Amino acid sequence: MIISYMLMIITFSTIICLVFLSWRVSAKNIITKIVEDSSEEIIYKIERIFQASLARNNANHSLIENKMVDLEDKKKREMFFAGGIKLYDEEVYSFSYGTENGEYYGARRNEKNKIEIMENNADTNGKTRYYATATDLTAGEFIIETEKFDCRTRDWYKIAKEKGKTVVSPIYKHYEMDDLAISIASPIVNRNGALQGVMGTHIPLSNIDNHLKEIVKDKRTAVYIVEKGSGELVANSMGRSNFKTLDKDIIKRVTIEEIDNKSIREAFQANKKNSETNFIIETENDILHIKLAEYKTEGLDWLIITAIPESQFTVEIMRSVHFLIFLAILALIISLLIYWKSSAKILEPINNLINATEKFSRGDFLQRTVVFKNDEIGKLLTAFNKMAEELYILINGLEERVKKRTIDLEKTNLELNAAKLKADNSSQAKSEFLAFMSHDMKTPLTIISAYGQELKDEKIGELNPDQAERVDNILYASNQLTSIVENLLDFSKLEAEGKSSLLLGEVDVSVLAAEVANGMSSIYLRKNLRMITSIADTNLIIADRRMVKCVMQNLLNNAIKCSNYGDKVHFNVASTYEPVEGVLIEVADYGIGIPKNMQELIFNPFFQVNVALQHEQSGSGLGLAVVKKIVEAHCGKITVISDEGRGAKFIVFLPSYPEFDDAVL
């Protein structure tokens, strides 16, 4: 039954997903078509404005250039311009003619869409006067007079004069209106080809703004027209200004990079890089469909950017989808409730068995199930009851055995703890005894060494060869015994105090190694051994100088004990940077070697490889134990590489900057 419900849910969900995906594809296709239609409509509108204005401009140009209009006749001139502006579309603000001697005539539409006649000549002292239009299209009532204006300084006049043909001017700031404008300008020449003036048709770009708003007003669509090369705004449907006024006659064009819509900015940049024209960009709250269409004609190279949010077409459908999902979930919940009610009765015996099993597993061994019917489930319940009864009998006997075993274990643990405490006390007593004994032995040994040295130096009297040899034996034996005592003291101190016993400072290991090698050279000669040293300059490390010296001496002493007559011993010191900065100390001999099974034991106190291998030389068994204690106290590491009968190499790594606890530092 559960599988049936799951299949129903999966089937229903799959159908909804397929319908939703199909709708999404259709919605995207529709939106793409709307974006393209909007772009085409805008291009058509712009094309109509410019082509109609260009055609009208060319016609008027012919009339003036062919002397079909007498511009010297004031009345005919006024009627020509007033009648001419009427024939232009409403997007055209003014239609004018400026002469090479600075005169300027024409007509314009004011803010109320009324036609006014313009006049600027010697009679107006270079200022432009505006007159209302009488019924016969001549100048009527005087309206206003502006400041001095010279048409010859305007961009549209200069570019037509320069090119010598009809041109579309660059976008400029209109001298009267707070607006950008563009002009279709045509030079007027006489029969000799001399320039007489320039006729212009002037279109404010705010009129294109208005057209854009009208085209997209019901579509929540954003439209920007920009100059392709510079990215400067020409017009837009968003009601924002296409320029900023910095001073009275100084403006700054707004670029596409300054608008708030990040997606449109990204689409423009992508188009500049790869000429792509169609984009679908996901924003934080919506999906934008963007189309970039090019409008290019003589003097114009514009990009028309149209952006439509997908949500305006999908909001209502998404509401319907959400409502459908709600109904589906509601139906599913009702179905599950019906299923739960019907299955609860069927599953009651099984739930009873599960509850009994859980209680039984928690230690309630008297728990039994209720047998409802003598069917398959009833037989299962009966079998459980029988099994529980047998386990109850078995567990009761087991509990008694566990209790007895627990008592025995507790007794054994107490005995072990007592033995451990006794061993710890014994170890501590041993350490204290060794420390006191070593300390008490050091003073007489120092006196013996001092007197022996005086005898050797013949301060007491001259020695014969036999006496000199005996004095050397006394000094060698006392030095060996002093080394053992110092090892005992160091071992006891490190075991009791650990790292806190270190006297830290900067140590030049290479200098210290040379000192040790020089000091032990006589011992090596006495044993007829060759010490081969390789001591490189090393970095300074933070360490206990005496302890590091002790490490080298003990390793070299250990090599003496393990070497045969005439053997070589290598003593190498160098800096290292792996795994961290530090110093490597290596001592290698060619003596008896160390078996694999003893290489972990050699660092235990009082363990002697020589004795275990029945070698003739042996020591106290403390040297390597002290070395390991010192190395580990300095956060270092000691490694041994050896095969029995083939010598041994000890490698010590000491870090330059050990990570000591604050208490040590």
Image (cartoon, grey):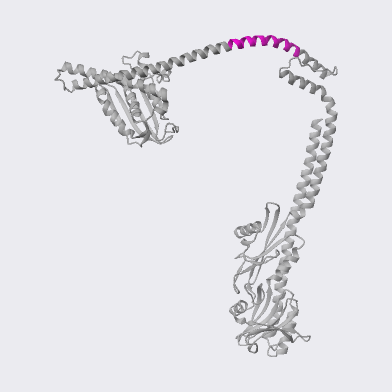
Q: Quadrant of the C terminus?
A: top left
Whether the magenta-drawn stretch holds residue 392 is answered as yes
Q: At 28% across and 28% down in the image, what residue appears?
A: 517
Whether the magenta-drawn stretch holds residue 300 is answered as no
**Magenta stretch mostly in which secondary structure?**
helix
Q: Position of residue 583 (x, y in %)?
A: 37, 33
Vertical position of residue 327 compared to residue 629: above or below:
below
Q: Position of residue 62 (x, y in %)?
A: 69, 83
* Magenta highlight range: 388-409
Vertical position of residue 19 compared to residue 407: above or below:
below
Vertical position of residue 254 compared to residue 147: above or below:
above
User: Can residue 52 be spotted in the picture?
Assistant: yes
Q: Position of residue 293 (x, y in %)?
A: 68, 63
Q: How many numbered circles does the render carry? A: 0
Foreground: 190 or 222? 222
Foreground: 87 or 313? 313
Foreground: 537 or 402? 402
Residue projecting furthest to the bottom? 73
User: Can residue 591 be spotted in the picture?
Assistant: no
Vertical position of residue 164 compared to residue 8: above or below:
below
Q: At 77% across and 61% down in the image, what residue appears?
A: 218
Q: Position of residue 599 (x, y in %)?
A: 41, 20
Quarter of the rendering containing residue 547: top left
Q: At 42% across and 35% down in the image, what residue appears?
A: 578
Q: Quadrant of the N terminus?
A: top right
Query: Does 203 sit left or right of 660 as displayed?
Result: right
Quarter of the rendering containing residue 627: top left
